[in-house]
Amino acid sequence: RTMGRLLRRGAVLSGLAATLTTYFGYHVVFTYLRAILEKSLAPSANAMSLILLVYALVNIAGTFAAARFFRRDLGRAFTVLYISGALAAGALYLCRGGEAILAPALIWGFLFGFVPVGWALWLVRALPKESEAAGGLTVAVTQLAIGLAASVGGRLMDAFGPEPLFFAAMAGELATLAAARRTMKCLTADEAREAASKPAEHSGSSPAKEQRTAFAAER
């Protein structure tokens, strides 16, 4: 029953759609990042291990930086994040085939560090009383997105090489931008309705309260 009620809310549906596209867009490249780097750089085993270690550290740095980034305006932060992600995906495509791909690859990893933090904050803000049920939906959608990214990315990689992956990632970022803007708009509308209903609730007097007031006046 709780799940059904959540899925009828526009903000929740848009948020789940954004979760699906953001994790798909990231993992369609991340799943095959080693193959992409090997094709572009042809590094030794030790060099590849070092590159992936730096990538992981940069990703962790993004997670720590996300707290301040999302502190003020969640909607504006999402806009900046996903425009930057689309540009990074485009840079990966432009820099493919050479050492220059390292810079956008590290930026890509850094930006994804922001994603789990941002959507966790959205979840707490959108559904403070139902975050556990909504969290279950989010986990399911995330796993679906990762599986789709691996499947679709693998087919594209086998058929056409790594280039289509960058376009798929860019499409995922732009789709997430649209869905994030939609969910923030729905969330703002929901919060406005709740704020408008509270004064009416507090200003109204219940029958029990009126009886207590009359009894006190008689005494």
Image (tube, rainbow, N blue to C red):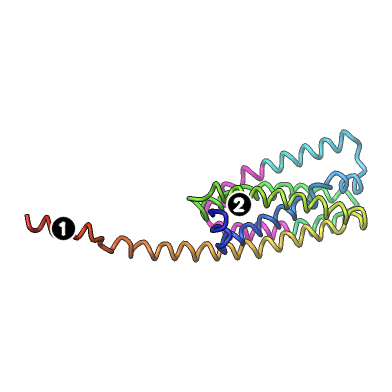
The residue carrying pointer 1 sits among few (fewer than 14), some (14 to 19) or many (20 or more) residues within 10 Å by Cα, namely few
Label pair 2/1, CB-CB below 8 angstroms: no
The residue carrying pointer 2 sits among few (fewer than 14), some (14 to 19) or many (20 or more) residues within 10 Å by Cα, namely some
Asked which quadrant contains residue 194, the reply is: bottom left
Is most of the magenta stretch helix, strand or loop? helix
Asked which quadrant contains residue 74, the reply is: bottom right
Q: Position of residue 15 (x, y in %)?
A: 61, 58
Query: Which residue is label 1 attached to?
Result: 213
Residue 203 is tagged as: none
Asked which quadrant contains residue 12, the reply is: bottom right
Number of marks in picture = 2
Residue reaching furthest top? Answer: 46
At label 2, the amino acid type is Trp
Give 195 or 2, whichever is nearer the viewer: 2
Give 133 or 151, whichever is nearer the viewer: 133
Q: Which residues are magenta?
A: 61-86
Q: Which element type, helix, strand or loop, lies under badge 2?
A: helix
Residue 119 is tagged as: 2
Q: Which element type, helix, strand or loop, lies under badge 1?
A: helix
63 in the magenta segment = yes
Q: Position of residue 96 (x, y in %)?
A: 87, 54
Q: Taking 199 as reference, is 121 left or right?
A: right
At label 1, the amino acid type is Thr
Q: Position of residue 138 (x, y in %)?
A: 63, 51
